[in-house]
Image (tube, helix red, strand yellow):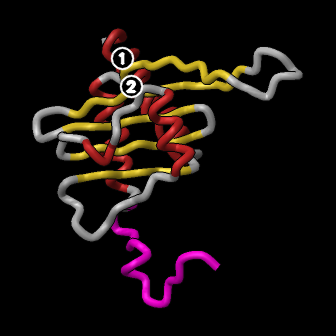
Amino acid sequence: MAVQRNIDMIQIRTVILLVAFLLQLQDVYPQSKKMKDNRATIDVHQESLSKKLGLSNLKKFNHEFAFRFWGRGQAVDITGDSTRIVGTVTNYIYHQKKASDYRTDTLFKKASLSPEQANAAYKLFLNLKLLNIPTDEKVKGWRKGV
């Protein structure tokens, strides 16, 4: 009984930390085959960073759904289909070898989420209803640029 309670507490803490993390995210880029009227664009910087970090190209993804959450120094990918959901966290930093040299290296490390964590992130994303936000073409009077 005590062991089950400890496992439950660990799962609760994990979900709380995941919710706190997702609430601090700066950008979210969903891509789903099922979406017809809602899509997000990825800017050139993030596309370049995605390549450096070895992240998959969401535009060419073969899964039913794929979400990428960007935070400061972190990218979280949640992908899946009708049978399973998979999550990966990629933490990264920029390293400058010499103060006088403007060039930087991007150092990163990837970690897989447990199936429970990936499912929790997926459910949270769906509950945020971000897929219901209309694209610029659907907002009357929206102008691109200034």
Residue at mark 2: 11
The answer to which quarter of the image holds residue 24 is top right
Mark 2: which secondary structure? helix
Q: Which kind of residue does numbered mark 1 sit on?
A: Ile
Q: Residue furthest right?
A: 100
Q: Residues within 10 Å of mark 2 (few under 14, many from 20)?
A: some
Q: Image quadrant for the C terminus?
A: bottom right
Q: On the rendered structure, is 104 left or right of 7? A: right
Instruction: Considering the whole magenta stretch, tell me its main secondary structure.
Output: loop
Q: On the rendered structure, is 3 left or right of 35? A: right
For the point 87% across and 21% down, which residue is it?
99
Q: Is residue 4 magenta?
A: no
Residue 5 is situated, as x and y percent measured from the top left of the image, at 36, 18
Residue at mark 1: 7
The answer to which quarter of the image holds residue 115 is top left
Q: Is residue 107 above or below residue 86?
A: above
Q: Is residue 94 above or below residue 128?
A: above
Range of the magenta residues? 130-146
Q: Which kind of residue does numbered mark 2 sit on?
A: Gln
Q: Is residue 143 magenta?
A: yes
Q: Residue furthest bottom?
A: 141
Closer-to-camera residue (134/41)? 41
Q: Are marks 2 and 1 in contact (CB under 8 Å)?
A: yes
Q: On the rendered structure, is 60 left or right of 13? A: left
